[in-house]
Image (cartoon, rainbow, N blue to C red):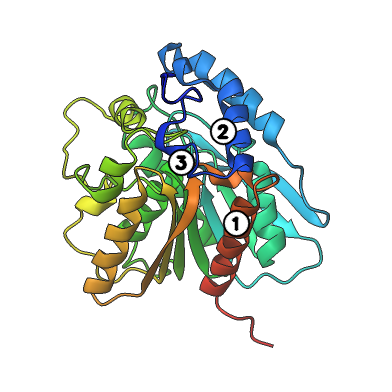
Amino acid sequence: MANTGSDPTGRGKYADRLDPELWDYIDKVNSWYPPEIAAAPIAEQRSVYNRMCVAFHQGRPDGVTTSDGLVATAAHGIPVRRYRVANGIAAAIVVYYHGGGFVLGDLDSHDDICAEICAGTGLEVISTDYRLAPEHPHPASFYDALAVFEWVAATSALPIVLCGESAGGNLAAAVAQAKRHHPRPAVGQMLIYPGLGGDEAGRSYLEHAEAPLLTLADIDFYRRIRSAPGQPPEDPTFSPLKDRDFSGLPPTVIVTAECDPLSSDGEAYRDRIVAAGGRAAWREEPRLVHSFLRARPTVPRAAEAFERIIADIARLAPAIER
């Protein structure tokens, strides 16, 4: 936002709405990945984003082990990273899809988040390095997300919980919808500030069109990059809220940030599942913004929200039979 005489901070209506610690986080993100980077070549955007992710990385909790591998498809291999608690007995396996607007991110960008989910829940976690746009427009990321789900279902006897953040939340929801009749469907899904292709005349899209760290213009930018020529607007694999059938989906938890244009997507998705007879809960975390998971080390509200998310994921997994 531009500075004005009445608002020397340039923070507009959010100046007093967000905690000082969160503003420190927002300023740090913008110092690493400034809004004007959207005009740079994609390779430069990724390089800058990756450096930012390294700067924010919190390390892995003690006792979490990792191993990297490839999920083979007919055309390519999909890199994955498995997280386990040493000497632990996992009740389920979390298939995790990272955020980054379908343009940014990889196994390293969300490594510490996945490790903390593993440590906090005791569950195995499989992080998915799906193909990115614009080199690989939709449905490439969706097909990779499906392939990893199929691979986990075929190679692990553990119940599967789908989990995704931002763009990854879109992928998790699309996989849950596409695979609801699979012989081993997901037992739950956890969607963290997901972009689900909701109505941009909705509440949060209007109220928070210029929110810090994600604006309506940003959403449009990433949508256009992801879209292949002739992308159908009603394609539920692109926009899960465009589906006509929300029955048969696993128990679902959606967590959004109050000051995020995408928040209404979570509310709408909850309502569609419940109306179809399913179980879904939506929680809007107050006075937080998109990408708040990275703020968890320094922003108490973000840390508390992440703790609730970890508890939600653990509850979605079946109890271990003793």
Q: Mark 2, mark 1: which one is toward the viewer?
A: 2
What type is the residue that disc 3 sits on?
Answer: Thr
Relative to 225, 44 lies left or right:
right
Residue beneath the point at 63% across and 34% down: 24
Which residue corresponds to the image point at 45% horizontal and 11% vertical from the top-left? Answer: 41
Q: Is residue 74 left or right of residue 138?
A: right
Give SS at disc 2.
helix
Query: Which residue is found at the position 67% from the left and 58% from the top?
Result: 118
Q: Position of residue 43 (x, y in %)?
A: 51, 15
Quadrant assignment for the N terminus: top left
Q: For the point 50% across and 54% down, which residue is it?
A: 151
Q: Amino acid at mark 1?
A: Phe
* Tag 3 secondary structure: loop
Instruction: Decide: is 90 above or below 154.
Output: below
Kindly identify which residue carries mark 3: 73
* Labels 1 & 3 near each other (Cβ < 8 A): no
* Outermost front residue: 6
Quadrant into which the C terminus falls: bottom right
Q: Residue at the far bottom: name it.
A: 322
Mark 2 and mark 1: Cα distance apart in space: 17 Å
Q: What percent of the width, then of the height, locates residue 46?
A: 54, 21
Label drawn at residue 306: 1
Whether residue 280 appears in this view of the structure is yes
Vertical placement of 264 versus 214: above or below?
below
Q: Amino acid at mark 2?
A: Ile
Mark 2 or mark 1: whose residue is earlier in sequence: 2
Identify the element where label 1 is drawn: helix
Name the residue beneath numbered marker 2.
26
- Where is residue 293 shown, x and y percent of the image? 58, 47
- Of 118 and 185, which appears nearest the observer? 118
Q: Compute the Cα span from label 1 to label 3.
A: 34 Å
